[in-house]
Every structure is written in C-alpha cells, then in structure tokens.
Amino acid sequence: MVTFLSGGTGTPKLLDGAAAAFSPEETTVVANTGDDVEIGGLLVSPDVDTLIFQGGGVLDRQRWWGIRDDTHRTHAALNDIASAADLPDGPQYLSEDRQTEGREIARWRRFSGIAEFMTIGDRDRALHITRTSLLDQGHTLSEATDRLADGFGLTIDLLPMSDDPVASLVHTDEGMMHFQEFWVGREGEPDVENVEFRGSSHAEPAPGVLEALEGVVVIGPSNPVTSIGPMLALPGVASALQETTVVAVSPFLGDDAFSGPAGKLMEAVGAEPNTSGLATAYPFADAFVVDERDSTEFSRPTFRTDITIDNRSDASRIVQTVANAIEQVS
C-alpha cells in the first residue's frame, strides 16, 4: 500500500505514472484542502477537484485544473453584470463577521461571487454545486468527495485531508489574504511575511487519513508550504510520518521551483527557498528524489533522475525511481 500527499499540480502530474509501480487498488491519495474557498456560496476544493477530473479523464491538462473544453459563460456573465452595475471587481474577501456565518467548513475563506476572481468553468461549477448541496444536506466533505469520486469513476482512494475548516492565509506587506487571493487574485506579487494554517490545531484528519499514513508515504513535487504544509499542521500527521517510510520528490531544480510560489513561501517560513530547504520542510523524510542536474546533498539517501514531468512517460520514470527509493530505505 502507498499513500501520496497531494496538492497543487505537481503531485497530480506524478500520479499520471503511479501505475508504473503501484496498482490503483493499493493507492490512496490524501488531498490538501487548505486552498479551499467558498465563492459565490459554493465550496470550491481545487486540489481535490484536480484529482477527481484527472481520475475521470476530463482534466484540462494544459492548465492542470478545471475540465477540458469547458465553457465559461456564467463566469463571463458575472463580470458583465458587475461592470454594468458598477460593482467592484477582483477578490472580495468577506468581512470578519461574515467569515463565521454560513456553513462551518467555509470558515475563514469566504468570498463574494460578484465578478469572481477565479475562473470557474460551467461544468466545473456543476461539481461545486453538487458538493455544496451534499454538504448542506449534512454530509461531510469526506462523504461528498467519496460520492463524487465514484461518480467520476476513480480507481484510487481519494481522501480530503480534513472535514474541518483549515485556511491557508498568507500574511503580506499588503495585509492578510487567503492563498487563492494571493496567488490567483494578486498573481503572487505581494511580499510574504508569514503563512498561517488557521484552524489546523483544532481540526482533525479526515476518516482514514491516519490509517493511510501507516503505510509507505510519497510526498509529490507539490509546494511544501501551502500544498503539503496544511496537512502537516493537522494533529497527528507529522508524528505519523515519523513512524513510517516517507519519500519526498523535490518541486525544485536547485534554486528554481518548477511552478508556483514555492520559493517565496519557503523563505517566508524560514526554510531555504530551494532543494536544500526540503530537509527543513520534511524532517521526517527517509529519502529524497531530486533532479539529476541538482547538486544538492542531503544527510539522508538521495535518488536522482530527470524530475521534469511533461508526459506520462516522465511521470512513470520518476515513480519507478520513487519505488526504488522505497525498496532501499524501507
């Protein structure tokens, strides 16, 4: 059995090659929910959704989010109405008192739907409507995710990290903002002072998560701070990882992140913004998989290959390197 910790686009790309070493029946994926937002009254779970669309064969692989060939008529109409009515555009983070109203799972991450700052496709939106309806009927996020995963025909086990609200909040020189506002709304431009996983100390791992961490764990090439960090902040997760075999795949080539603001965020939390910083981010890791062009040395076993993922063949090669690392350090 193997469990992948997944967030953003890095680990989903790696999962394209998972079958090269691990059967779907033996594979569990725990997805980050710290990036989740409620926008326009709908709970959007980006990292869960990427995995659902990937497993269902409908993922937009050009962007690695959303549904391939989706339309965006609702999104466009919202912007048209906002413009006609002279309403503000850009991220409209709801006020502090409004953050604690409504469904509990949306706490600290609620945005107005006026002129949405995130582009949500029409078919994509249908999933959010369904998820939110299931939540409003009393189902947990885990239960809703399970139903949606079944509906899209997933063959792996997909678990959200928690059924409780955890919000990745970025403290910047322009004030505090949710990660989605920082990265999507502001294009990652504000200077980052710190990152907070609000609610994590009181949240519980979702049912099945700690059990999944009893087997071998692979941390994919996701952002260590906002994609993996919220999971590590949950009670019991870091200690569980100390007790099992963990192999981490680098999201860096030396000083350069393959995608996203990983370097900027690593520096903000006191870790080196490069491959070397993985030793700080993942002190429990038993081995690292890094790029063959990367000269970084660790005190723990290090396995090298070309970690650029442009297609399934690349992903399969890296997964085979991961499997080799697992065999040698288990």
Image (cartoon, rainbow, N blue to C red):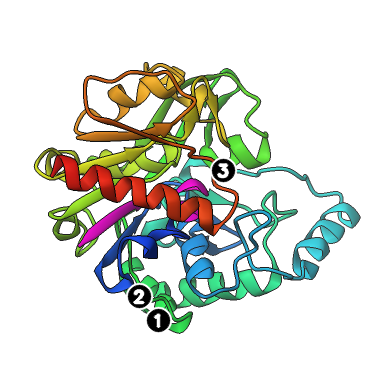
Q: Is residue 244 above or below residue 267?
A: below
For the point 48% across and 60% down, the residue is: 16
Quadrant occupied by the N terminus: bottom left
Please tell me in which quadrant of the rendered image residue 189 appears: top right
Q: Are marks 1 and 2 in contact (CB under 8 Å)?
A: yes
Picture coordinates of residue 195 (x, y %)? Answer: 42, 28
Residue 248 in the image: above or below residue 120: above
Instruction: Magenta stretch: give its range.
Output: 1-14
Quadrant of the rendered image containing residue 101: bottom left
Give the label, 2 or 3, closer to the camera.
Answer: 2
Task: Give the labeled residue for mark 3.
Answer: 180
- Residue 202 in view, yes or no: no
Q: Amino acid at mark 2?
A: Asp
Q: Depth check: 322 or 250 in front?
A: 322
Q: Earlier in the sequence, mark 2 or mark 3?
A: 2
Name the foreground residue: 119 vs 96: 119
Residue position marked by numbered label 1 in the rendering: 150
Residue linked to disc 2: 146
Residue displayed at 38% across by 60% down? 18
Q: Could you tell me which secondary element the residue under label 3 belongs to? A: helix
